[in-house]
Amino acid sequence: MKIKHNKKRNTAFVYEALVREGTSAILQGDEKRRNTVISLIKKHFANDSILKKDLECYRSLYEANSLSEANCAKIIKESRLQKRLIDPEGLFIKQSDLIHDVNKELSPQIFNNFVPNYKSLASIYQMFSNDTSPKDSVLLENSVLSHMQSREQSSEIAEVDDIVVNSFVQKFNTKYDEQLLDEQKTVLNLYIKSFVDNSVEFKMYLNEEIKRLKDEVNKAKHNNLIKSDSDMLSKTEKIIEKLDSFKNTQIDEHVLSTVLKVQSLVKETVENGNSN
């Protein structure tokens, strides 16, 4: 019999729920809430903290994809070992502190945030539990292993609900589809997570994305519609200059919002070019 999943005691779920809350705050322009989320993440998931160590046991599993069965089995074995090395009493105390701070400084509703990979996180939580029966433990491990072998990780990028999307559209006065583009959701989530991971992954991804955007905008310059319009051509050049300027600029929400808008522009330009 599987044990009940206590999501408040699932370190990875609480972390992902906070990341989603931070993303929502950025999209809605709520700087106070955004700063509170970042402060909580920095406080409770600092390097060498027991919650960070627990989180890494989960992340090794739910962030892996397209791996061989042999590698998946090795990662699961190592994650189980690292999890057992964590002091359960110390972890419980730190989880309680985190739950208290979330309730006090944000809202208990944070724990009701939609986290797309919830089922995977619940399976990992149950697999890690010492109270899970041997049979269920094997079945759960098979489920986790299957997920690690899949290529569907992109579907687990946090979705943004309609209210948040509408706020985003209103804030940037730009026409978007019903949902944010996958590349926009990736940038937003990595931006929030960068406050825990020292920005390395975010900066690497952003540099690659800015290069991709520059290449696409340069291609757009050869579009007949743009070439024949001096105003549009001038604006296109300014976009390239703006993207180039980010090389020596500290990443902040101004840079973030510009990248998001250019992503949407590039998507629209490519689609229009394909339809012509």
Image (tube, rainbow, N blue to C red):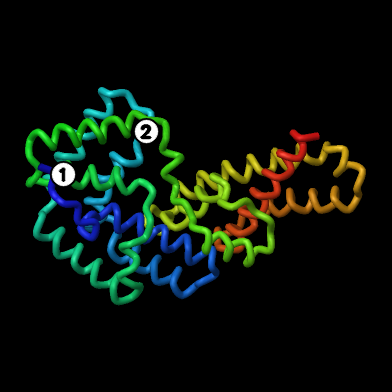
Disc 2, SS = loop
Is disc 2 surrounded by few (<14), some (14 to 19) or many (20+) residues within 10 Å?
A: some
Q: Earlier in the sequence, mark 1 or mark 2?
A: 2
59 or 113: nearer the eye? 113
In the rendered picture of this protein, how many numbered marks are placed on residues?
A: 2
Identify residue for label 2.
Answer: 65
In which image quadrant can residue 250 be found? Answer: bottom right
Q: Residue at x 44, y 63 (%)?
A: 22
109 to 87, vertically: above or below: below
Residue 128's disc is 1
Image x and y of residue 141, in percent = 20, 34
Location of residue 166 (image quadrant): bottom right
Q: Is residue 161 above or below residue 269?
A: below
Q: Position of residue 176 (x, y in %)?
A: 64, 53
Q: Tell me which residue sits at (46%, 53%) in the image.
A: 189
Mark 1 Cα-neighbour bin, 10 Å: few <14, some 14–19, many ≥20: many
Q: Quadrant of the C terminus?
A: top right
CA gap, disc 1 and disc 2: 19 Å
Residue 132 in picture, x, y percent from top left: 10, 43
**Picture layout, residue 134 above or below residue 202:** above
